[in-house]
Amino acid sequence: MSSSPTPELLDKLAERLGSHLLRRDAFRGEATVVVAPQAWLETCRFLKEDPELAFGLLVDLTVVDLQALGGSPRFELVAHLYSIRKRHRIRLKTPVPEDQAQVPSLTPLWKNANWLEREAWDMFGVRFLGHPELRRILLYPEFEGHPLRRDYPLRKRQPLVAERDVEEPRSMVSEPVRYPVDPRFKTFGV
Amino acid sequence: MKPIPQEPPRDHMFLNMGPSHPAMHGIIKIQLELDGETIVGSQVEIGYLHRGFEKTCENRTYTQVIPYTDRLNYVSPLINEVGFCLAVEKLFGLNVTRRCQYIRVLMSEISRITDHLTCIGASAMELGAVSAFLYLIKARETLYDLIEEVSGARVMPNYIRVGGLKSDLPEGFEERTRLAMGEVRSVLDETHRLLTRNRIFVDRLSGLGVISAEDAVSHGFTGPCLRSTGIGYDVRQAEPYLVYDRLDFDVPVGETGDNYDRYLVRMEEMKQSLRIIEQCLAQMPQGPYQVDLDGREMTPSEVIEGMKAKPPLQPIRQARIRLSPDLEGTEKRSVQDVVADDKTVVFPPKEDTYGNIEGLMQHFKLVMYGHGIRPPRGEVYQAVEGGNGELGFYLVSDGTDLPYRLRCRGPCFHLMSGLSTMIEGETVADVVPTFGSINMIGGELDR
């Protein structure tokens, strides 16, 4: 069974968050903490770096569209964190309004946040401020709309995409990189 | 983020590996920037197999989702089913019977072995060791035979149900499993002799595709790829689900996080899975078996007291298990021990469906559009240890028969996000074993 952090740790988190803590509940032994969007990055940083909480693993990051539930604001950003050392799990959420669908990016904290946030943008159209390259990941650039939103019809057809011109590839490195030659090649006299 | 110059340095060459490349099993594109033969930059592009899994599931009933989860990681489909069914059961707060839990563990471990066999076999073949591939796939086939015997299908079993299983194990399954285990064990020994100290194989793997423990955690690595870096995180051990806390097994870890360590971790995990399977066969409760509403075993006196109660306690089951070839093992005596006692969730035995009005209605209430399984409102996250790492299902229920939101956390997605750091600085030829040791499964990656 998954284990939520001890009540003392949750109290400590609540104390730290202060007025940024919007809601806190538990269902089937899983702790959920809802924070204000402006405290999103700082809360994650605290959860990751505090030695008692030590949530080192960003398990998952996703969005729930609350439109059909009549939720307001419309989106909810959901992160699942896990601490390998402390063996506890937490669900962190923040409300995201539709007209201003943007949240600070978690890329400074976790490397997999890059792809997870790209997917959230791709599927829900939530923007992440400070993300290095926020572009679609599973779908193609010409795709219209964000398919996991509740108002995107299940059987909607997308227009055909014109053939693209081949682009000149752009370098992925900023300065010349010289990696050392693999020592195995020396045996061949290279 | 480093600034990207518009003009690539003159001596760099760009190479597209994939989306259609023999070594890119599954479709994926890796754009490489090469200096001579050394990779100086890379970009991984995914999404070629995106099928809208989550969107589809949000428009299907819970029961209809189960066969679709088979298509996520299609080399270990039973683990996906177990993960999804556990998530739905968690929403209900439902416990399944002990025998069912053992069978689920047993089938998960068989699936884990098929997963690892495929991974090692395919990566060995890409390095030229075709004979090892054939031996490993032969062993996988004996396991597929077992799965076929139980579920009726080799690759897409659709065997686990919310609240139980499709049917109990067939007669004689235990002996045949033991035989298959012996065969797998001998193939593993053979593979060790063929590969583990093979000069060509070791040279192509060791010291390559290295990832540090910090990077691995930061990229969200789980499963064999994380354990190869020395971090022994395994969901089965850290958060035991089903009956893993009653079973004795070790979690192998590597040291350096290179391809060779990943190979060794997988080889050892298969041995541990064999151990788990043998323990399951030994511990699995057989025959007459009573449980109460919480899935707790009851003593005979408790059963008698329960029968006296008014109304009598429903979930008292005493049927022996025998399987007949007709009705596909879904008749009363073979399902009663492996399904939970909740008529709003599990399908009735086929005699009841065809034989009396209550059974017919129970079946219809679960199958008909607009009825179906209706978990209470709420949200749960359930993780299981898949072939490649933590496989999670995040379910949001609004109390209707359709999942309001179903999110699948596939381990491959996170592993692939770390591929660039693993291949940069190495040669083009090293992409193949590194990519092979990650064991990317397109169905789970692109969903």
Image (spheres, coloured by chain):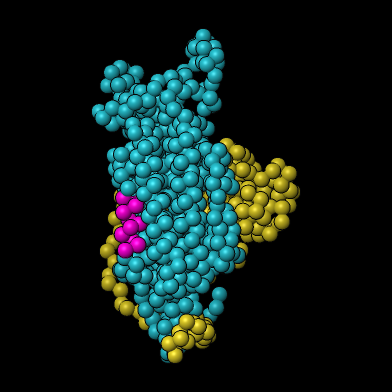
Q: In which image quadrant can residue A27 be found?
A: top right
Q: Quadrant of the C terminus of chain A?
A: bottom left
* Magenta residues, dominant SS class: helix
Instruction: Provide the letter of the chain coloured yellow.
Output: A
Identify which residue is drawn at 39% across, 53% down.
B186
Please count the marks in the image.
0
Left or right relative to B353: residue B264? right
Q: Position of residue B379 (x, y in %)?
A: 52, 41
Q: Position of residue B210 (x, y in %)?
A: 52, 70
When the figure is inspected, residue B346 is found, relative to residue B256, above or below; the finding is above
Judging depth in this view, the residue of B147 and A114 nearest the camera is B147
Q: Is residue B304 visible?
A: yes
Left or right relative to B1: residue B362? left
Q: Is residue B159 visible?
A: no
Left or right relative to B419: residue B70? left
Q: Quadrant of the N terminus of chain A?
A: top right
Identify which residue is drawn at 63% across, 49% down.
A87
- Chain B colour in the picture: cyan
Judging depth in this view, the residue of B389 and B64 nearest the camera is B389
Residue B142 covered by magenta stretch? no
Q: In which image quadrant can residue B148 be found?
A: top left
When the figure is inspected, residue B429 is found, relative to residue B409, above or below; the finding is below
Residue B134 covered by magenta stretch? yes
Point out the stretch of residues depicted in magenta.
Answer: B131-141
Judging depth in this view, the residue of B45 and B151 nearest the camera is B151
